[in-house]
Amino acid sequence: MVDVSRVQKELTECNRDSDVSGVSIALHDGGSTITHLTGTIAGPLDTPYQGGIFRIDIRLPGGYPFEPPKMQFITKVWHPNISSQNGAICLDILKDQWSPALTLKTALLSLQALLSTPAPDDPQDAVVAQQYLRDKSTFVNTARYWTEAYAKSDSTGMEEKVQKLVEMGFPEDMVRSALKSVNGDENMALEKLCSG
Amino acid sequence: MPRPLPSASGAAPPFRMPPVFIFRDDPIPDSLRPRQTERKARRRGDEQALGDAAANPISPSLDSRRPGPAMSTKRVLCKFFMHGACLKGDYCEFSHDWSDQSNNVCTFYQKGSCSYGSRCRYDHVKVSRKNPVPPLPSSSTSARNSLVPLPPSSNTATRVASTSLQLLSPGRPLHLGHQTNSSNQRQQVSTDLLPLSGSKPAWKNEVQLVEDGIDWSFNQTEQNQTSIKLADMPICSFAAAGNCPYAEECPHMHGDMCAVCGKMCLHPYRPDERQEHIKLCEKNHKRLEALKRSQEIECSVCLDRVLSKPTAAERKFGLLSECDHPFCISCIRNWRGNSPSSGMDVNSALRACPICRKLSYFVIPSVLWYFSKEEKLEITENYKAKLKSIDCKYFDFGTGTCPFGTSCFYKHAYRDGRLEEVTLRHLDCDDGSTLIAKNIRLSDFLSRLHL
C-alpha cells in the first residue's frame, strides 16, 4: 500500500515553496485518488526551455516510497532524454537508483536539472540525441519552438485564443472548456466546437 | 523506649519513637484487634499455657506451622529494591540480589481473567499447582512493607485498635515487628510468625497466636530495648514517595534527598542501599534524557517522528552500522528487504543508506537514538551481545549449516553447550593474496580430474 500520510506530507511540503522552487504537485485533473498526481515544473533559465511550464504525469506504485514513482511528461518536450513521442523519461533515480529518502519534490527538481543538462550519451529519444550531437543550433531552435508551442499555451496564449474563438461566434464558456479539454491547442478546440 | 545510638546521633535527624502507630505486619491479625475484652479474658484464663510458651518458645506446634513462603520468597527479587528503594534493607523477605528472578506472574490471569489482556505488564503464564510460585511480591510485600504512619485524617477506630495492642502488653513498648534481633531464638519466633500472619487464615490459630504474641512481647522487652540500630529503622515511605502528610511532625525518620530523582528516599544509615539507589537513579535519568532527545528525530523515509508512531513495535530506530542517518526500524527493514526483482541491485542500492548511499551490512534496532560515537558503540555492542546469546536456527545445535559461518551474530553451540570451533584454512595464492577456503571436498577434486 502507498504510504498515504507520507504522500500528504510531501504535497504540503512541496507546494509550500513552489514559487521559489518552480515545482508544484496537485491531484491529477482534480481527481480524488492520491496515487495519481500531476506535477508541474518551470523550464530552467538560460535554456531553450526557459519560460515554459511542463506538466508531468505521476503515478505512485503500491510499494511507494520503496519503489520509484512512475513519471512521464504530459507536455511535449524536445530533449535527448525524454521521448518526443510519449514523454517517457530516462533518469536513473526513477529506475534503479531510486532511494526512499527521495521525494516527489526532489524527483521533480531532478527533472528540472535534467532539462538544463541533457545527457545525449544515454538517450531516450535517439533522433533528438543525434540532432543534439551533430547540429546543436538546430536542436536549440527546435527545443525553443516546442517550448513556445506546447509549454506556454495554458498561461499566456490562452486569452488570445479565447478572444479569437469568441470572435468567430462561439460562447466564451464553451470556448474555455473546449480549450482546456484539448490542452490549449487552438485548432483542436475549433474542431471540437464545430463538431459538438 | 529505644533511643538513638550515641555514636550515630550527630548525623541523623532526631529520632523519636512514635506516640501511636500501627504495624501492619504485626503478628496479630487484624481480625483480632477490636476484640480486646475477649482477649483480655483469655489472657487471664490462660496464664498456664502462656508460661509454657515462654519457657519453650519454639514449640513443635509452632515449628510445624512454619510456612514455606518465608524460604522461597528469598529467591524472588524484591519489587521495591528493583525500583531503587526498599525500606526494609537486609530484613526484606525478598531477595536483594540482582541475579534473582523477579516474580512477574499475573495473579488475575491465574484466576482466569485479566482485564488488561495482552497489554498486561505481568506475565500471562499458567503456573502449575504442583510447583507453586511464591506469593506475588505485590500482595505480600506491600502489606508488610509499610510501617504506616497514620495519615492525619485517619479515624479513631484505628487508634483504638493500636491502643488495644498496648493493652495487650501493658507498660511495654510495642515490639518492632521483625526488626528485633537481640536474641536468636526470639528472632526465630518472629520470622516464623511474620509470614504466618500473612499467609494463614486468621481464624485457624487464633488462640495460639494471641498467646504467642503476648509471650513474644513479654520476653523481647527485657532483652531488646536498646539494641535497635538506626540502620534497621525504616524511613518514612510517604516522604520517599514524595509527600509526607506529617512533614516535620512525622514520627519516622525521613530519608535524605536523592539529587537525581529529588525524592527523600536515601536511607541515612544504609550506605550500600544509598549507592545502589543513586547508581540506578542516574542510569534511569540518563536513559530518560536520551529518550527525550530521541523524541525529535524523524525517519527520513516515512517523514514521521520515530517515537511517535502508533504501535510500540514501530517506535524503534534502525541504526545503520556505517553511517548516522536516522530511520525507523520498519522503514529501513522494508527498504532493505525490497525484492531485487524491482530492478534495484541488492549490493549497491538496497544495502546502501537511502540518504548517503553508504553500504551497511546490518541494521541495529534501538529504542534510543545516539548522540555520540560511544553511545552508538554501546548500543551496537549490546545488540550483538544479545544476539550472541540466542541459538542460531541455521546452525541448529550442529545439525544444520549456517550460511553466515563464523561471521554469524547468533550463537553456534552444540547441545552439550560446547561452542563451535572453526579453524579457517588460508590458501596462499601465487600473487601473494590469501583466500579463506571453505568446505574442501574430495569429491570436488575427483570430479575435476580428467583421466
Image: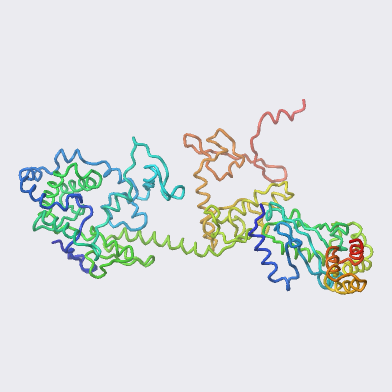
- The image quarter containing residue B245 is bottom left
- The image quarter containing residue B267 is bottom left
Q: Position of residue B440 (x, y in %)?
A: 65, 34
Left or right of residue A169: residue B427: left
- The image quarter containing residue A43 is bottom right
* Quadrant showing the C terminus of chain A: bottom right
Q: Position of residue B396 (x, y in %)?
A: 54, 36
Q: Please name whichever residue, B191 or B305, is drawn nearer the observer in this view of the structure.
A: B305
Figure disc tally: 0
Q: How is the image coloured?
A: rainbow
Q: Position of residue B154 (x, y in %)?
A: 23, 63
Q: Residue at x 52, y 46 (%)?
A: B387
Q: Please name whichever residue, B63 or B389, is drawn nearer the observer in this view of the structure.
A: B63
Q: Position of residue A47 (x, y in %)?
A: 85, 70
Q: Residue at x 52, y 35 (%)?
A: B397
Q: Residue at x 16, y 38 (%)?
A: B61
Q: Residue at x 67, y 29 (%)?
A: B442
In the image, farthest residue toward the top? B451
Looking at the image, is B344 positioned above or below residue A170? Answer: above
